[in-house]
Image: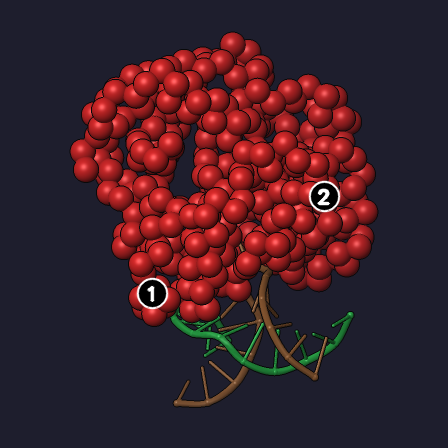
Chain colours: A red, B brown, C green
DNA sequence: CATCAGGGCCCTG
DNA sequence: CAGGGCCCTGAT
């Protein structure tokens, strides 16, 4: 499906703003639903039942930021469609986040100040919907990253929608409920293993709208966590990622998985990842950052990955096995 | 060649 | 609350 260029809107993030740090996360695994180069991100998106292409451009500066959003689609969007979409983009990419209080704390902390200096203005956030993220989270479970990438690609190629826009050929997620007619066996044929069952159940739950992403955003932390854990296939690890990436919770930190434990040992304590520090020690260290602990870790983590991309921090290679 | 753990979760006892 | 089962793959 070839999409037409429909219109552009300029969004004004709060200052300071770091475009690439916000629109590209080097630790997220590559997926055919998006593409990035410095200053530009392309993203497929399903909004209000329509699949569209989005192009984000860095159209401002650190102190006077602007993001130009260009919409590609089949027919000209209504004003209401555009307005709600822009609001959603501001939410998903955290364009209105106020970073200054966090930076005041970060300035006096040694590993953190360097990360903040490099990524000044970066926002946490995630481009996908709750439903889409649940699919991604399921694929991450009990699998090396390489395999998660394969499964995501297989699913999008089989059930996603091919969108051609702005010279890119990308795949958009299917609508929730679209997997209803597909058998578990068919999904298993894509090497999903037991995850096929989880994805079938997720898809069915979301077709019935049993989880409302938008009202859940307004709920208190504990209620969000409980609601997420009650979704079939979501355990503590996946809920943790969801609370941070999708629900923008920054004031909790209660879970460190073994592979992350190794990385935090090096990142926070400067010690060898081969003899990881106890999880309790790491949590205590992280909780020092108080209500901003997730932001602090996000900055340290992303800074590490950007450095890795530049060819620094080679020790990371054996721990991530891409 | 066989074995095993890998960016967990569900279910049972 | 502990522990078995789940699936496939690449590493050893």
Task: Assign the N terminus of chain A to one quadrant of the image.
Answer: top left
Q: Using the image as rendered, state which of residue A261 and residue A133 is in the foreground.
A: A133
A208 to the left or right of A121:
left
Picture residue at 32% right of the left edge, 18% below the top: A78
The residue that appears at 70% across and 36% down in the rendered structure is A220
* Camera sees residue A162: yes
User: Callout 2: residue from which chain?
Assistant: A
Q: Which residue is mark 2?
A: A222
Q: Residue at x 51, y 9 (%)?
A: A64
Relative placement, left or right, of A208 versus A237 is: left
**For mark 1, what is the residue?**
A183
Q: Is residue A84 above or below residue A135?
A: above
Q: Residues within 10 Å of mark 1 (few under 14, many from 20)?
A: few
Along the horizontal axis of the image, is A272 left or right of A93?
right
Q: Chain of mark 1?
A: A
Q: Quadrant of residue A243?
A: top right
First of labels 2, 1 by sequence position:
1
Residue A182 position by quadrant: bottom left
In this rendering, is residue A278 above or below A239? below
Q: Residues within 10 Å of mark 2 (few under 14, many from 20)?
A: few
């Amino acid at each position: 499906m070839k999409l037409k260029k429909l219109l552009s809107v300029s969004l004004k993030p709060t200052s300071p703003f770091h475009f690439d740090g916000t629109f590209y996360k080097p630790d997220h695994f590559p997926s055919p639903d998006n593409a990035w180069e410095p200053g530009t991100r392309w993203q497929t998106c399903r909004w209000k039942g329509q699949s569209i292409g989005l192009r984000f451009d860095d159209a401002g500066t650190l102190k006077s930021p602007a993001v130009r959003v260009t919409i590609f689609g089949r027919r000209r969007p209504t004003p209401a469609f555009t307005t709600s979409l822009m609001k959603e983009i501001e939410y998903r990419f955290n364009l209105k986040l106020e970073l200054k209080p966090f930076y005041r704390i970060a300035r006096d902390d040694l590993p953190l100040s360097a990360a903040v200096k490099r990524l000044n203005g970066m926002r946490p956030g995630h481009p996908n919907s709750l439903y889409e993220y649940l699919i991604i989270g399921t694929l991450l479970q009990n699998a090396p990253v390489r395999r998660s990438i394969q499964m995501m690609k297989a699913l999008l190629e089989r059930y996603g929608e091919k969108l051609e826009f702005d010279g890119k050929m990308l795949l958009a997620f299917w609508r929730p409920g679209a997997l209803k007619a597909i058998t578990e066996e068919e999904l298993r044929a894509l090497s999903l293993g037991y995850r096929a069952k989880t994805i079938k159940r997720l898809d069915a739950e979301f077709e019935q709208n049993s989880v409302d992403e938008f009202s859940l955003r307004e709920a208190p932390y504990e209620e969000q966590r409980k609601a997420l854990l009650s979704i079939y296939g979501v355990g503590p690890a996946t809920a943790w990622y969801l609370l941070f990436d999708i629900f923008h919770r920054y004031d909790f930190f209660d879970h460190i998985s073994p592979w992350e434990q190794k990385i935090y040992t090096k990142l926070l304590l400067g010690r060898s990842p081969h003899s990881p520090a106890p999880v309790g020690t790491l949590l205590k260290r992280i909780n020092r950052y108080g209500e901003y602990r997730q932001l602090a870790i996000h900055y340290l983590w992303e800074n590490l990955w950007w450095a890795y991309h530049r060819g620094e921090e080679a020790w990371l290679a054996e721990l991530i096995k891409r």
